[in-house]
Each structure stands twice: as C-alpha cells, then as structure tokens.
Image: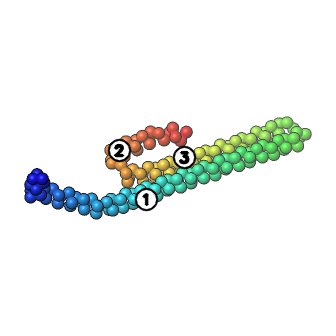
C-alpha cells in the first residue's frame, strides 16, 4: 500500500500517465485521417485497375476486329480464286496458255492482298498492345515506385516485349 502511495505522489508517474493519455488522444485523432488516406489510395488503385481492364478489353476488341478483317480477306481471296477457276474452265476452249497466265496473275494478287492485310493487322495490333502496355506501366510507375525500382521494371518490360509480341 505504501508503494502505491509513493507512486501517486511521484511526479514521473504523472508525467508518464499524461504522456500515455496524450499519445492515446493523438492516435485516436490520427486514426480517421490515416484510414481516410488509405481509403482514398485504395479507390485510386481500384480506378487504375478498372482503367487497365478497360484498356485490355479495348485491345482485345481491336485484335478481334483485325482477325475478322483477316478472315474476310481470306474469304475474299478464296472468292477470287474460285472466280479465277470458273474463268479458267470457260477459257479452256480458247487455249491453255491464256488460262494459265490469268490464273497465275489473279492468284498472285490474292496472295499479295492477304499478305498485305495480315501485315497491317499484325502491325496495328502490336502498336495497340505496346501503347496499352506503356500507358499502364507509366501510370503505375509514376505513382507507386521509386526511381531505382522503376528503371529496373522498365528494363525488364523492354526485354520481354519481343517475346510477348511474337
């Protein structure tokens, strides 16, 4: 009991008690600010993820359009080849030499169109994919990483691009 009496009359005890009280009030007041900041940060990240998903969906849509164009070009080429074959059957009576030349010319044109459309589609999809990836990486890197980590991630992403695009 006497120890308790001495403790109550000790100035250091009251300073410690006041410090603990002040610390408790400070933590209680700062709690709302910290949770608000964390909620804001979580909302911001959620928004960025939504934007990245939207960009990925846009890239998928563009890829599907290009694949559809490629299929249409192949169908068109098949139609051209079929028309050339019909022409060849009609022209067979006129002479085999003219027929072979016409078929070869149309076939070459169709293959050139296919190759050109394929290359355009691949180039456009690659460009879109690179733009989407660069935009997403820029956004994340600009907001969340220090300079050293950012440089490392950029180097890794650049090194991985050829494998990703082929």
Tell me the residue that label 1 is attached to.
Answer: 43
**Residue 11 visible in this rendered orientation of the protein:** no
Q: How is the image coloured?
A: rainbow
Look at the picture and state if 160 lies above or below 34.
above
Q: Secondary structure at mark 3?
A: helix
Q: Earlier in the sequence, mark 2 or mark 3?
A: 3
Q: Estimate the x, y position of residue 4 in percent, counting from the top left.
A: 13, 54
Q: Residue at x 48, y 49 (%)?
A: 133
Q: Secondary structure at mark 1?
A: helix
Mark 2 against mark 1, which lies toward the viewer? Answer: 1
Q: Estimate the x, y position of residue 17 in percent, counting from the top left.
A: 17, 58
Q: Mark 1 packing: few (<14 Cα in 10 Å), some, or many (20+)?
A: few
Image-based side of 44 in relation to 146, left or right: right
Q: Are marks 2 and 3 in contact (CB under 8 Å)?
A: no
Q: Earlier in the sequence, mark 3 or mark 1?
A: 1
The numbered disc on residue 51 is: none
In the image shown, does 35 or 91 lie closer to the viewer?
35
Q: Earlier in the sequence, mark 2 or mark 1?
A: 1
Q: Residue at x 67, y 50 (%)?
A: 69
Look at the picture and state if 157 lies above or below 10.
above
Tell me the residue that label 2 is attached to.
Answer: 149
Mark 2 against mark 3, which lies toward the viewer? Answer: 2
Q: Report the Cα–Cα distance between label 2 and label 3.
A: 26 Å
In the image shown, does 154 or 82 lie closer to the viewer?
154
Q: Report the Cα–Cα distance between label 3 and label 1.
A: 31 Å
Tell me the residue that label 3 is attached to.
Answer: 126
Q: Secondary structure at mark 2?
A: helix
Q: Quadrant of residue 148?
A: top left
Q: Estimate the x, y position of residue 119 in percent, counting from the top left.
A: 61, 44
Q: Quadrant of residue 166?
A: top right
């Amino acid at each position: 009991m006497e120890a308790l009496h001495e403790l109550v009359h000790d100035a250091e005890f009251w300073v410690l008690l006041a410090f603990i009280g002040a610390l408790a009030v400070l933590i209680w007041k700062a709690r709302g600010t910290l949770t608000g900041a964390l909620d804001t940060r979580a909302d911001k990240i959620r928004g960025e993820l939504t934007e990245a998903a939207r960009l990925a969906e846009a890239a998928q849509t563009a890829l599907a359009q290009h694949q559809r164009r490629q299929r249409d070009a192949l169908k068109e080429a098949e139609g051209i080849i079929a028309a050339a074959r019909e022409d060849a059957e009609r022209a067979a009576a006129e002479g085999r030499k003219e027929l072979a030349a016409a078929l070869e010319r149309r076939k070459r044109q169709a293959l050139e169109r296919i190759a050109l459309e394929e290359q355009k589609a691949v180039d456009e999809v690659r460009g879109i994919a690179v733009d989407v990836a660069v935009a997403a990486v820029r956004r994340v890197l600009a907001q969340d990483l220090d300079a050293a980590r950012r440089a490392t991630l950029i180097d890794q992403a650049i090194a991985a691009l050829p494998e990703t695009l082929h």
